[in-house]
Image (cartoon, helix red, strand yellow):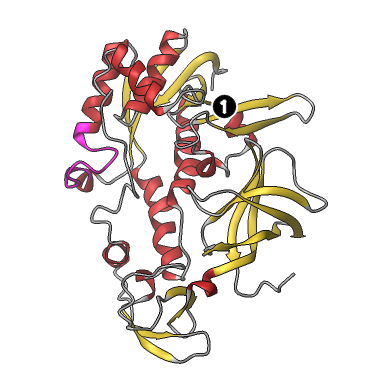
Amino acid sequence: MAKPKRNRVVAAMSGGVDSSLAAALLKKKGYETIGITFRMWPKEECGASFGRACCNLEAVTRARSVAAQIGIPYYVVDFSADFRKEVIDYFCREYLKGSTPNPCIVCNEKIKFGKLLEKARSLGASHVATGHYVNVSYNKRSGRYLLRQGKDRLKDQSYFLFNLSQDQLKSALFPLGDLTKEKVRALARKMKLRTFNTVSSQDICFVQDLDYAEYIKKKTGIKVKPGEIVDKDGKILGAHKGIPYYTIGQRRGLGIAHKEPLYVTGIDIKNNRVIVGPRGEVMKKSLVAERMNWISAEGIARPIKVMAMIRYNHKKAQAKVTRTGADSVRVDFDEPQAAPTPGQAVVFYKRDVVIGGGWIKDTSEVEPV
């Protein structure tokens, strides 16, 4: 493989305003820019997506139009097999074992900064670029690349990128990191990009009807089994439709008449039970996380104070992180947090810098401090 050209970059183009402007700004700065849209759904599903798929015909047409307008080569690359294996199968597997997955994080790691980076290097490019609202900087003292929050805190997506490696961060460009969403639309309009007023995508892109359990049944062919809804003492309060229909912190759809609102506080896979309780029982002061990814350092040797985020758009909370094993930590919050959920990520910050993060393993068996 030829040595990558430092000035050549592959820009991921979804057909939205963010990725369109990112590509346009790179071209304006003098980068040799190549636009790529990756098809992540099987062809028949893209055609039946009614506009929700990131790879539907309308999105590809918009991206191709912007690429032509700004004068860059453009390609559509098929990553559907990789997406099925790395993201969809993971999504289904996690729900079936009672965890709540975060496919966007896995997609960024495995596809957008995994397969796309491989493709970029095969095209002789040194970098990939996306429309994420984050920044990357280099710390000479530590010799490490740092992931930082974007200027627009309401759009910041650093939580979703916590699992990127040093090589991936080194090879990533984020042209929108110092812009607000309002500024992005204004610049796109000024540059007369066709996508300046496109609606931002929401929810999980591949679940068309937004019913996760039905999607999992369709994809896996597994028949989910109904079971009991119980309180923490095992008292039967009702019946559930199947484990994939429920997640920690859920309040709606329980079908239980009770004197106070009840929330899902636990999933008992072994006994096929959903455990519920009042709000106080979903408030947790500690959790255990595993499969850590450290960004600003190679790891921690002693407890550190951080601001921790347990889900996207969750308000950061003060916490202490203590190493408990080669690849696990305990997180103790200053104040109880609502529904930290196994399968979700907990991400640690110091000011605007992502220290690292990991995957929440458990909250139920964490001993009080």
Disc tally is 1
Query: Are there few (<14), some (14-19), or many (20+) residues within 10 Å of tag 1?
Result: many
Q: Nearer the viewer, residue 236 or 87?
A: 236
Image position, residue 170 (x, y; %): 61, 28
**Depicted 295 relative to depicted 218: above or below:** above
**Depicted 135 relative to depicted 70: above or below:** below
Image position, residue 314 (x, y; %): 51, 51
Image position, residue 139 (x, y; %): 72, 26
The magenta region covers: 46-58
- The part of the image, by quadrant, that contains residue 366 is bottom right
Q: Nearer the viewer, residue 163 or 346?
A: 346
Residue, far right: 302
Direction from residue 313 to residue 297 in the image, left or right: right
- The part of the image, by quadrant, that contains residue 88 is bottom left
Residue under pointer 1: 171
Q: Quadrant of the N terminus?
A: top right
Residue 325 appears in the rendering: no
Say whether residue 53 is magenta: yes
